[in-house]
């Protein structure tokens, strides 16, 4: 008898030690245990579980009383999950909120298993409630930090964009000034025609809109939030940009050859942003050919599909790119022009990277000029049967 008593005392001590260890582990992990017996609608909650549910020492109900411990907006969802588990048996899991006595919210995840009896009716439910408030807070903090970093990146980029603002606005503003001066001279002459004067005014309005789009794009990049992407047809967009620069091309005696696809897949992107990339590359080529004789100023623009990307090339017959700078064309302030700020291509590269594309350049094999390339991924959801012009 004495030996049996000692063995029983030893077993009880071991069980007590194990219970204390489990309680310590549960507290360390913010973990509470629960058991529900169906035939008595009896619910048992461990002390840690009662603390997590803010229900004090007394458990005054069954499984649906347990559900009522959660935030009222989560209850219907939790009931639906439990009803399914009770009807079919097996595991369940749900994240939900618990209103705390101080008015704040605790996030918990409850998971467990429903055991079915002989008649396939629920017999017992075993589960745990785990406090994940800190985890959710960390996730929220990480998301907020990511948003703040994205915003700071945009603000930092504005430091670079400020240097490029003069370059971006110089083209349309110079065109406006030139057309205004031409209109004044035209009015002073004796050869005034309404048709020609209307054409000058139309050019002024068009260039004013270009300047406004530059400013609007910079405001969009500075604001928090994502750029608006739309379906674009690059062939149509190229045609529109060439049309916008038609007077510039004619005035500088540049011949343009377009080699565009007959049917082009869509790409997703910002219309103004991609148009600005195209306009910047063409203007760079125009300026690169200034030193060439008028008969040698040729601009070739082509598009083609390659490995789920549309590639656009702008080839000129200008001076080319120095070999020691060919790989650095997209770096800020790395200009090959005497008076260049070195920001135009850097901005183009940033825009294309945001669209999943890239920018690069090659000197032409015949030694005359360079070719600038950019690529954009196609929109896999639709392939148009015919070319649809960009609006």
Image (spheres, rainbow, N blue to C red):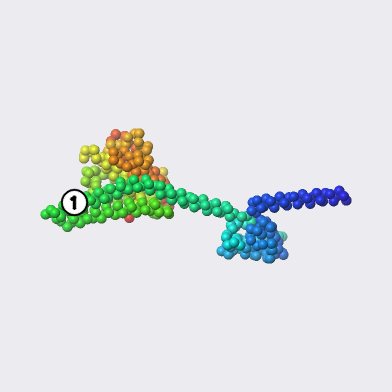
- Residue 306 lies in quadrant: top left
Q: Residue at x 26, y 44 (%)?
A: 256
Q: Inspect this view and state whether residue 159 appears.
A: yes
Q: Is 32 left or right of 320, judged from the image as shown?
A: right
Q: Residue at x 67, y 50 (%)?
A: 25
Q: Is 262 left or right of 247, judged from the image as shown?
A: right
Q: Residue at x 24, y 38 (%)?
A: 291
Can you say whether 379 is above or below 299 in the image?
below
Picture coordinates of residue 260, whole percent (x, y): 32, 46
| Nearest the eye: 102 or 200 | 102
Picture coordinates of residue 149, whole percent (x, y): 46, 49
Picture coordinates of residue 189, whole percent (x, y): 13, 53
Q: Is 105 left or right of 352, judged from the image as shown?
A: right
Q: Inspect this view and state whether residue 354 appears.
A: no
User: Total marks drawn?
Assistant: 1
| Nearest the eye: 165 or 318 | 165
Picture coordinates of residue 8, whole percent (x, y): 82, 51
Residue pointed to by mark 1: 182
Q: Residue at x 37, y 38 (%)?
A: 328
């Amino acid at each position: 008898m004495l030996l049996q008593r000692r063995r029983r005392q030893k077993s009880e001590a071991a069980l007590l030690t194990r219970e204390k260890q489990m309680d310590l582990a549960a507290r360390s992990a913010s973990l509470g245990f629960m058991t529900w017996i169906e035939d008595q609608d009896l619910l048992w909650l461990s002390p840690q579980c009662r603390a997590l549910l803010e229900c004090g020492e007394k458990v005054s109900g069954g499984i649906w009383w347990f559900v009522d411990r959660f935030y009222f907006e989560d209850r219907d969802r939790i009931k639906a999950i439990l009803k399914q588990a009770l009807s079919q048996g097996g595991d369940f899991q749900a994240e939900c909120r618990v209103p705390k006595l101080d008015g704040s919210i605790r996030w918990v995840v409850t998971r467990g298993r429903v055991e079915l009896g002989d008649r396939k009716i629920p017999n017992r439910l075993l589960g745990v409630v785990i406090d994940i408030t800190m985890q959710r807070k960390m996730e929220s903090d990480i998301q907020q930090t990511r948003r703040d970093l994205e915003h700071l990146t945009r603000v930092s980029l504005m430091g670079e964009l400020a240097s490029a603002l003069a370059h971006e606005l110089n083209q349309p503003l110079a065109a406006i000034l030139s057309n205004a001066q031409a209109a004044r001279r035209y009015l002073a002459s004796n050869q005034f025609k309404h048709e020609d004067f209307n054409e000058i005014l139309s050019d002024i309005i068009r260039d004013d809109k270009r300047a406004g789009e530059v400013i609007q794009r910079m405001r969009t990049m500075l604001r928090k939030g994502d750029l608006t992407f739309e379906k674009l047809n690059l062939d149509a967009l190229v045609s529109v940009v060439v049309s916008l620069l038609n007077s510039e091309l004619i005035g500088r005696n540049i011949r343009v050859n377009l080699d565009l696809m007959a049917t082009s897949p869509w790409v997703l992107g910002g219309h103004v942003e991609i148009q600005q990339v195209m306009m910047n590359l063409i203007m760079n080529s125009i300026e690169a050919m200034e030193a060439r004789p008028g008969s040698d100023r040729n601009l070739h623009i082509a598009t083609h599909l390659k490995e789920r990307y549309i590639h656009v090339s702008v080839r000129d017959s200008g001076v080319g790119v120095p070999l020691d700078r060919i790989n650095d064309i997209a770096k800020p302030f790395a200009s090959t022009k005497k008076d260049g700020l070195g920001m135009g291509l850097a901005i183009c590269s940033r825009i294309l990277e945001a669209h999943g594309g890239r920018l690069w350049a090659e000197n032409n094999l015949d030694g005359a000029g360079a070719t600038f390339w950019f690529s954009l991924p196609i929109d896999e959801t639709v392939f148009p049967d015919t070319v649809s012009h960009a609006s």
